[in-house]
Amino acid sequence: MPVRLVYFAWVRERIGKPDETLELPGQVKTVADLLAWLPTLGEGYEGALAVPKAIRVALDQEHVRHDEPIGEAREIALFPPMTGG
């Protein structure tokens, strides 16, 4: 099942696009799996996701930890840490 990936801030800048729809491979079951797989798609992804711990993720607009299963999520958002102020 295809899933929409949405990128924000410098993640978007480094990947070079605001969003895309991808078919995830069978081995991508968790957010951590996704963050390990995406850099295989090219240099922009490698640069954006070089430090996976720095990336925040939301599944269907709900913030989740990296050990969260992706399950039937239709949208996955990736963004850098947010700062308050």
Image (spheres, grey):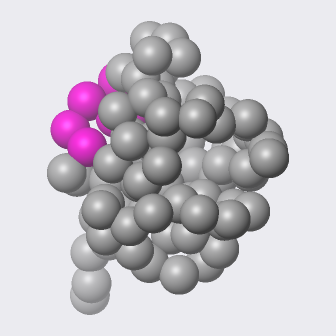
* For residue 37, above or below residue 71: above
For image coordinates 73% across by 35% down, the residue present is 23
Vertical position of residue 65 compared to residue 6: above or below: below
Q: Nearer the viewer, residue 35 or 10?
A: 35
Say which of 75 and 25 sits in front. Answer: 25
User: Where is residue 15 shown, x and y percent of the image?
Assistant: 54, 29
Is residue 40 shown above or below 25? above
Q: Position of residue 13 (x, y in %)?
A: 52, 35
At 43% from the left and 29% from the top, the residue drawn is 37
Residue farthest front in this picture: 26
Check residue 51 for magenta coloring: yes
Of residues 16 and 22, the one drawn nearer to the viewer in this rendering? 22
Q: Quadrant of residue 60?
A: bottom right
Residue at 53% in and 60% down = 70
Q: Quadrant of the C terminus?
A: bottom left
Which is more toward the observer, 37 or 54? 37
Residue 79 seen in the current view: no
- Taking 18 as reference, is 65 left or right? left
The answer to if 67 sits in the magenta stretch is no
Residue ID at (66%, 65%): 73
Whether residue 63 is visible, yes or no, is yes
Quick one: which residue is furthest to the bottom in this view? 85
Please count the marks in the image: 0
Q: Is residue 2 left or right of residue 84?
A: right
| Residue 59, quarter of picture | bottom right
| Extreme residue in the top direction | 43
* Residues rendered magenta in the picture: 47-52
- Residue 61 position, x and y percent, is 61, 78
